[in-house]
Image: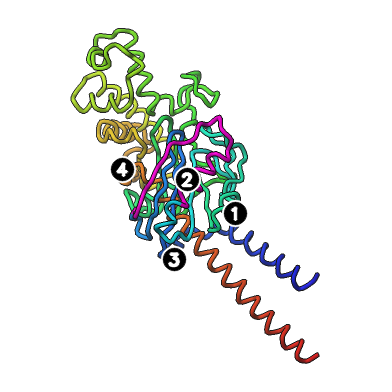
């Protein structure tokens, strides 16, 4: 093998090794990550949010746009991400980009295997974006990035074993063990919403019945409220009056607003989904035994209307209750920016490793140059 080919081969091998070791050496490595600004991207079904985040988790600038229609090609979404990053790069020195995607991401954090709200199927998102942006790119599931942000800067600080549950349209989740994101063997751990809790229960879009998110999520909350209103239940009079009889106008934020105002039906609905939330948390505690559960997502904005009944149901159904320590249940602190902040912070770790790999390659080439130079002088 020629010297040039050997150098190219070794360089490629070094890059592959960097990516392979990212997950293994993630624990505590944020302490030595470069304190440089990075961009975090949070991609959902309705919006793409991008922000420049510093090493302390502070958002220096944030911009957002609507997510292109899911029927369009994956390149359309890719173009949107590139435009946002380039816009931010005009005003900030960006060293890496982190992507939090609502979908399944492979264990190497390079490909989006499946995104329910976008036309991504086995999409090599990391490499395509890195080629266009010319900076290191990291791709992860959005629940993983949100959990990382809460562990680093939010409600999970000081907790090395943490489970995050995100309540939105459905239920997402993430696991941090010993200060490291546990993504599972294939990268798709944390899909808590599709644990079966009621055999033969409500049909879930995933194709199964009785999934947890059919009983404790934004969809479950709205479905129950609309069913009560459609049945013209007397307890639903308040919400029916509020929407002028247009049942399809009943939304999660409206139910939350009325519950805070004391509407009896809306308060009861939150108690119901809160109890189901507590049951699911107790099951996860039996399996994973974390020290803390962080509850995030849009539905968590209901605060104690949701979390109080969840804590009660958790204590009532926890295996070994009364004879074991109970995990803390806390509301997430970083709000809708958590996924973006976590993606930026995880990208900072990748930037550090690429810096190290590049420095080592330069040192190796310089060493080879000195050796070849001596050989040429002696010949």
Marks 2/1 in contact by CB < 8 Å: the verdict is: no
Locate residue 26, reporting x and y percent.
49, 58
* Earlier residue among tags 4 and 1: 1
**What is the C-alpha distance between the residues marked 2 and 1?**
18 Å
Looking at the rendered structure, the secondary structure element under dot 1 is helix
Q: Which residue is drawn at 51% across and 48% down?
A: 82
Write down the quadrant of residue 325 in the picture. top left
Name the one closer to the observer, 320 or 87: 87
Q: Which mark is residue 100?
A: 2
Can you say which quadrant of the picture contains the N terminus? Answer: bottom right
142 in relation to 225, above or below: below
- Magenta segment: does it hold 98? no
Q: Which mark is residue 173?
A: none
Marks 3/1 in contact by CB < 8 Å: the verdict is: no
In the displayed structure image, the side of residue 324 where residue 105 appears, left or right: right
**What is the C-alpha distance between the residues marked 4 and 2?**
22 Å
In the displayed structure image, the side of residue 13 where residue 233 appears, left or right: left
Name the one closer to the observer, 212 or 127: 127
Q: Which residue is drawn at 69% across and 67% down?
A: 10
> Which tag is nearer the camera, tag 4 or tag 1?
1
> Which tag is nearer the camera, tag 4 or tag 3?
3
**What is the C-alpha distance between the residues marked 4 and 1?**
40 Å
**Residue carrying label 3:** 34
Looking at the rendered structure, the secondary structure element under dot 2 is strand
> Which tag is nearer the camera, tag 3 or tag 1?
1
176 in relation to 313, above or below: below
**Residue carrying label 4:** 330
Marks 4/3 in contact by CB < 8 Å: the verdict is: no
Residue 23 appears in view? no
Looking at the rendered structure, the secondary structure element under dot 4 is strand
Q: Give the extent of the magenta segment.
A: 59-86
């Amino acid at each position: 093998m020629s010297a040039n080919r050997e150098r190219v081969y070794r360089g490629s091998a070094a890059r592959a090794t960097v990516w392979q070791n990212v997950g293994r050496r993630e624990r505590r490595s944020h302490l030595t990550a470069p304190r440089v600004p990075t961009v975090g991207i949070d991609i959902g079904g309705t919006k793409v949010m991008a922000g420049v985040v510093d090493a302390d988790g502070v958002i220096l600038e944030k911009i957002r746009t609507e997510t292109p229609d899911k029927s369009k090609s994956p390149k359309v979404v890719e173009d949107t991400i590139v435009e946002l990053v380039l816009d931010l790069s005009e005003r900030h020195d960006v060293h890496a980009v982190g992507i939090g995607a609502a979908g399944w991401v492979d264990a190497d954090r390079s490909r989006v295997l499946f995104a329910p709200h976008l036309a991504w199927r086995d999409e090599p998102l990391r490499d395509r974006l890195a080629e266009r942006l010319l900076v290191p790119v990291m791709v992860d599931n959005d629940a993983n990035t949100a959990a990382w942000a809460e562990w680093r800067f939010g409600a999970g600080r000081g907790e090395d074993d943490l489970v995050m549950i995100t309540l939105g349209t459905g239920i997402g989740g993430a696991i941090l063990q010993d200060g490291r994101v546990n993504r599972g063997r294939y990268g798709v751990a944390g899909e808590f919403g599709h644990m079966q809790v009621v055999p033969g229960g409500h049909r879930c879009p995933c194709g199964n019945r009785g999934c947890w998110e059919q009983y404790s999520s934004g969809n479950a909350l709205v479905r129950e409220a609309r069913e009560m209103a459609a049945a013209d239940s007397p307890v639903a009079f308040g919400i029916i009056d509020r929407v002028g009889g247009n049942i399809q106008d009943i939304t999660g934020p409206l139910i939350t607003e009325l519950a805070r105002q004391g509407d009896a039906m809306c308060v009861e609905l939150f108690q119901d989904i809160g109890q189901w939330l507590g049951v699911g948390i107790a099951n996860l505690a039996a399996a994973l035994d974390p020290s803390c559960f962080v509850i995030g997502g849009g539905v968590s904005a209901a605060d104690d209307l949701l979390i109080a009944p969840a804590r009660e149901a958790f204590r009532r159904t926890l295996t070994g209750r009364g004879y074991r320590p109970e995990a803390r249940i806390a509301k997430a602190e970083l709000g809708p920016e958590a996924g973006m902040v976590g993606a930026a912070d995880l990208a900072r770790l990748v930037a550090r490793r690429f810096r190290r790999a590049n420095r080592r390659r330069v040192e190796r080439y310089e060493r080879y140059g000195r050796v070849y130079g001596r050989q040429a002088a002696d010949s």
